[in-house]
Amino acid sequence: MVKRLVAYFHNYKLTAIFSPVLMLLEVIGDVAMPVLMAQIINRVTEVEELTNADIEYILKIGGLMVVVALAAMFCGAFSSFLAATASMGAGAELRDDLFTKIQTFSFSNIDHFSVPSLITRMTTDVNNLQQTGMMCLRMLVRSPFMFLFALIMSLSIHAELACIFLVAVPILAVAIILIMKTVHPRFVAFHEKIDDLNTSVQENLTNIRVVKSFVREKHEKEKFKKANDTLTDTGINAVKIVIMNMPIMQLVMYISILAIVFFGGRLVVDTTLGRIAAEAGLQAGDLLSFITYVSQILMSLMMLSMLFLQFTRARASGERILEVLDTEVDIKDPENPIMNVPDGSIDFENVSFRYRTGSGEDTLSSVNLHIKSGETIGLIGSTGSAKTTLVQLIPRLYDVTKGCVKVGGRDVREYALEPLRDSVAMVLQKNTLFSGTVRDNMKWGNPDATDEEIIQACKHAQAWDFISKKPEGLDAPVSQGGANFSGGQKQRLCIARALLKKPKIIILDDSTSAVDTATDAKIREAFSTELKGITTIVIAQRINSIAHADRIIVLDDGKISDIGTHDELMKSSEIYAQVYMSQQEGVISE
């Protein structure tokens, strides 16, 4: 995992190399400071009265300390800048790869992860890895080298006194290992709870109009509070282990310093009183520098422990990210794919389908159907009869579980995805517009469309009436999700966008449910001329919207119940006749 993630620093190699080098120079400066300080203190304590030579020496060493401090400060600051640049750049490339991979996902892949979880992985998890990368480029160099250099300097000052570390370091190492092993599964659970919270927030904000219309704010607050409290409890459960790190480190550090002060102080007194030889003893300046090195050693160990704990969290994030990158896309181009769809004929041959995340039962069962190129097909059925599922198999948004779907006489799995989906235009139940302008949204259907072509398509979809009334015309702004347009307006804009695609097959999934019957009739009239020669599948709840179709398919519980014209089905299909009569009764009562 580490090898794969580190590869994202490839384009930032120089930056990633110079940052640790500068950090190493800062460490050298920090380690040099206690030695220079000790020289000043020893010089002062050795003489009864300072002479001009002593003052000159102190000023010289003091000036050198200022220069070293400034150089170390510059190296540290520039190292931090380079580390941030490299880690942010690597994070951006990782995020880009994640987004690119998600774009190749089928609906099944997305259903498996869920949208909120994918968003969390692209944001929170990548940010965790960025932070870890930045810490590694600095702390992973600073801490070990600070520990090594400070240990060497403390041994050079007094080797026997430095043996205190032989007790302190193993205690710290055992504590860090135990904490890391305990906290990893808790961080994994913490990230899963973030996914749950994001799901709650996304559902609420996406469906805020429904929430308000049903006055369900209180229910949503309680649902959010439950997810938020669970996340908080899980976070505390992880953090209460992590926070044990600092007290343990500080306890060991303070005990070590007390031991050094006690034994080192006695050595300084004995040396001063001449009880032991100066070579075996310790001067006051040496003791102070020794204590400084002790602090540096223990601080470097504390930083390493914090870094290891960050590794634990980053490991959980890295596993989640690689899970996305390593996911096998179940719908992709075959070897030697067909690049051209000859016509709009459609065949369903003994097709069955079930969702991976569902109950395990078939949503569609043994569907056999032949649609001629240029034919207009109506599709009707009760809610949950799998009408939308059926048409999603045509552009291969899902793959069949059994049987095959053919377009232009060839199995859709033999086509390259781009030409196949480019030949099929879908206007879905949920009408989606993107932030920008009307023109921007229309060019989703055809990036090279002229204004005249866009206007013509809008006229066919009965959308030009309200667009032309806007001062900006085609440059009228579209807010996120098309919130500044009504449901019927969004439907008509989506239809116009699909017409610009000039496909071989067009699927209208209840796409005129939000428009009035008069506008619906105008759209059907325009389709009869504009879509001539194009295979048209119209899913509708209103029979009037599909009564003109060449054939009408009645779906019931994932199976084809009846097929025929309007007149034929009125005689042969009990389901169709009941739906028609109920709708006619509603019209008469109005």
Image: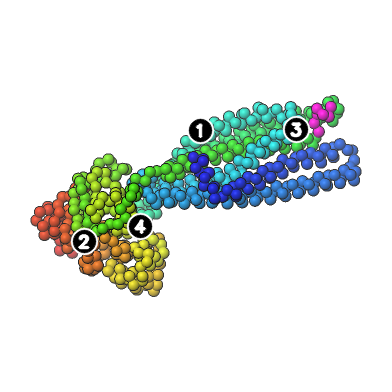
Looking at marks 3 and 4 on the same chain, the residue that comes earlier in the sequence is marked by: 3
Magenta segment's dominant SS is: loop
Looking at marks 2 and 3 on the same chain, the residue that comes earlier in the sequence is marked by: 3
Q: CA distance from mark 4 to mark 1?
A: 44 Å
Q: Nearer the viewer, mark 2 or mark 4?
A: 2
Residue type of the residue flagged with mark 2: Gly
Residue occupied by mark 4: 209
Looking at marks 3 and 1 on the same chain, the residue that comes earlier in the sequence is marked by: 3
Residue type of the residue flagged with mark 4: Arg
Residue type of the residue flagged with mark 1: Thr
Pointer 3 and pointer 4: residues touching (CB < 8 Å)?
Answer: no
Residue occupied by mark 2: 374
Q: Residues within 10 Å of mark 1 (few under 14, many from 20)?
A: some
Q: Which residues are magenta?
A: 277-283
Is residue 504 found left or right of 480 in the rendered image?
Answer: left
Label 1 secondary element: helix
The residue under the point 24% across, 55% down is: 408
**In the rendering, which numbered label is found on residue 156?**
3
Task: Give the image location of residue 382, x and y in percent.
Answer: 21, 52
Residue furthest top in the image: 275
The residue under the point 60% across, 44% down is: 137
Task: Give the image location of residue 203, x and y in percent.
Answer: 37, 51
Q: Residues within 10 Å of mark 2 (few under 14, many from 20)?
A: some
Q: Nearer the viewer, residue 436 or 209?
A: 436
Picture quadrant where residue 541 is located:
bottom left
Q: CA distance from mark 3 to mark 4?
A: 73 Å
Residue occupied by mark 1: 182
